Image: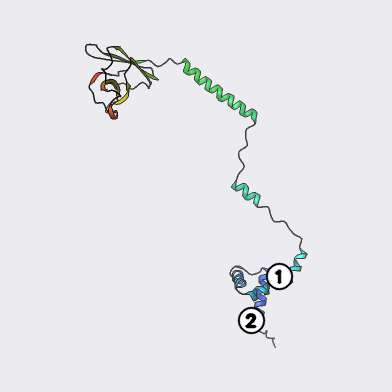
Amino acid sequence: MTAETDPLLPEDEDDALAAECALGVLEDEARAAAHRRMAMDAGFAARVARWQERLAPLNDAYAPVPAPEVLARIEARLFPAPAPRLPRLAAIFGALAATAAALALAWVFLLLPPPATVTARLATEDVALVYQADFDGQFLTVTRTAGTPAPDGQVHELWIIAPDAAPVSLGLLAGAELRLPYPTPPAGWVLAVTVEPAGGAPGGVPTGPVIVSAQITS
């Protein structure tokens, strides 16, 4: 004859489940379901707590083991150490080398011939009024070498005109000379002088007649 095992009562099943939960042997869905039941069933949570108390002396048989130091490794991955700085002496030599290269480059530029000056002569047919414009690569100097300034209430205004572009004012020729920073324009650009109201052309658009002009050829 074989002995038949009596089925567990619901109360015994709960006690067995509480013991398994306290031991931590439940897996995945069963563990999650037990934790949800503990949160909602105070009686079941008390069973788990009693089993934890009963099983606590078993921990005395095991020596404590420190947890692995993972924080340092996480910080090292998130915030890598900066690249090692050059020794002070190496940094000094690097600065000296850069200075030497800059001086050598400056010396080469000093040995190069200065850019040729481009001169444009703006004159009326009878040469009663003449303006001479000199470009040296850095500055434009316009000098009135013959004639007189505009009458009272008016002013001569200097314009530069690129091919297929609108005139751009370079300044007023109220005195005998105008000097301003300006690179040498390409050949084919035009210089022109108009007569404008005192203070210059309104809105930066020439309104008066062109009295002298010249095309830059080199």
Q: Mark 2: which secondary structure?
A: helix
Q: Quadrant of residue 88?
A: top right
The residue tagged 1 is 52
Q: Residue at x 56, y 22 (%)?
A: 100
The residue tagged 2 is 10
Query: At which x and y percent is residue 180?
Result: 38, 20
Query: At which x and y percent is residue 132?
Result: 31, 14
Q: Mark 1: which secondary structure?
A: helix
Query: At which x and y percent is residue 107?
Result: 50, 17
Q: Estimate how packed mark 1 is, as few (under 14), some (14 to 19) or many (20 or more) residues with alpha carbons within 10 Å.
A: some
* Mark whose residue sits in front, 2 or 1: 1
Q: Is residue 165 visible?
A: no
Q: Is residue 4 left or right of residue 210?
A: right
In this view, the residue in front, 128 or 117, is 128
Q: Quadrant of residue 1?
A: bottom right
Please name the amino acid that badge 2 sits on: Pro
In this view, the residue in front, 90 or 120, is 120
Query: At which x and y percent is residue 49?
Result: 69, 71
Q: Is residue 165 left or right of residue 84?
A: left
Q: Which mark is residue 100?
A: none
Q: Is residue 53 left or right of residue 168?
A: right
Q: Is residue 129 visible?
A: yes
Please name the amino acid that badge 1 sits on: Gln
Relative to residue 3, is residue 17 depicted above or below?
above
Q: CA distance from mark 2 to mark 1?
A: 20 Å
Of the 4 image quadrants, the one containing the C terminus is top left
